[in-house]
């Protein structure tokens, strides 16, 4: 549990259960005042959203953008790996080799070599290329300085384009986006993420390795 404004850790809960979080929100430790809580950022764990709404019905929950994008990255990785496994000859395997990071690369960071590989991919494996385009479009959507009212139809259009590809894992991701639409679009109200939490988790993992 963190305070994103002051960028400090407030507490560490023993588990991810809904009732555990509800109990904490109702009776936080001494010195933690939640009376003026206005919004909260979480990952896409439904128990967190439900717990916040149970205790604070008027508090806006913001789905963390990095967890949304991370879920899409996993799908791109799985689809790419499946394409590699289905390759019929060595030339096709060579073409698909090393695409993992290219398919997650932002357009402004592409080298000339990257652009040529993507152009070739558009001809040989159009669905993989479309996945890269969709990932870029989602990234650009999050970067827009826009209103929630404008962001919502753009997200709906993204979901419709993604479903058109007919990929089962991508459809499941679209189901998640639909289920979390309000919380995802809330980002354009409050512009917060739980990136600080992930940074703390990374530090903890480093300390554990040491």
Image: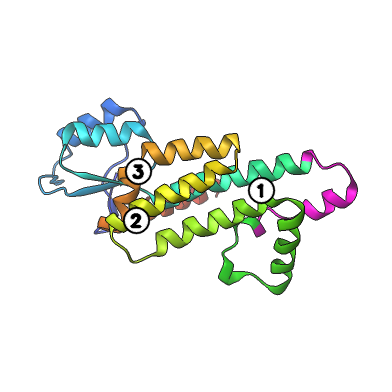
**Residue 159 pos. (x, y %):** 46, 45
- Please tell me which of labels 3 and 2 falls first in the chain: 2
Pointer 2 local density, CA inside 10 Å: few below 14, some 14–19, many at least 20: some
What's the CA distance linking mark 1 and mark 3? Answer: 25 Å
At 32% from the left and 40% from the top, the residue drawn is 12
Query: What's the mark number on residue 181?
Result: 3
Q: CA distance from mark 1 to mark 2?
A: 25 Å
| Disc 3 secondary structure class | helix
Ranked by sequence position, the earlier of labels 1 and 2 is 1
Res 145 visible: yes
Q: Is residue 4 left or right of residue 112?
A: left
Magenta region includes residue 98 = yes
What crowding class fits label 1: few (fewer than 14 Cα within 10 Å), some (14-19), or many (20 or more)? some
Identify the magenta region: 85-102
For label 1, the residue is: 127
Query: In the rendered view, does 10 fall on the left or right side of 136?
Result: left
**Near-viewer residue (31 or 16):** 16
Q: Which residue is mark 2?
A: 151
Q: CA distance from mark 3 to mark 2?
A: 10 Å
Q: Where is residue 182 shown, x and y percent of the image?
A: 30, 44
């Amino acid at each position: 549990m963190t305070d994103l404004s002051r960028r400090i850790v407030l507490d560490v809960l023993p588990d991810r259960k809904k009732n555990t979080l509800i109990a904490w929100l109702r009776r936080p430790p001494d010195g933690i005042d939640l009376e003026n809580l206005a919004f909260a950022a979480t990952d896409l764990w439904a128990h967190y959203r439900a717990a916040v709404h149970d205790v604070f019905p008027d508090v806006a929950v913001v789905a963390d953008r990095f967890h949304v994008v991370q879920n899409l990255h996993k799908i791109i990785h799985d689809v790419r790996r499946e394409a590699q496994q289905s390759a019929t000859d060595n030339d096709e395997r060579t073409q698909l080799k090393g695409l993992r990071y290219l398919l997650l690369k932002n357009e402004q960071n592409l080298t000339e070599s990257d652009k040529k590989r993507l152009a070739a991919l558009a001809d040989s494996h159009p669905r993989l290329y479309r996945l890269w385009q969709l990932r870029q479009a989602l990234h650009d959507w999050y970067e827009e300085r826009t209103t929630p009212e404008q962001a919502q139809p753009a997200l709906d259009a993204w979901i419709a384009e993604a479903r058109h590809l007919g990929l089962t894992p991508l459809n499941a991701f679209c189901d998640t986006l639909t289920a979390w639409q309000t919380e995802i679009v809330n980002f354009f109200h409050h512009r917060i993420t739980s990136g600080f939490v992930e940074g703390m988790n990374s530090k903890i993992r480093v300390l554990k390795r040491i």
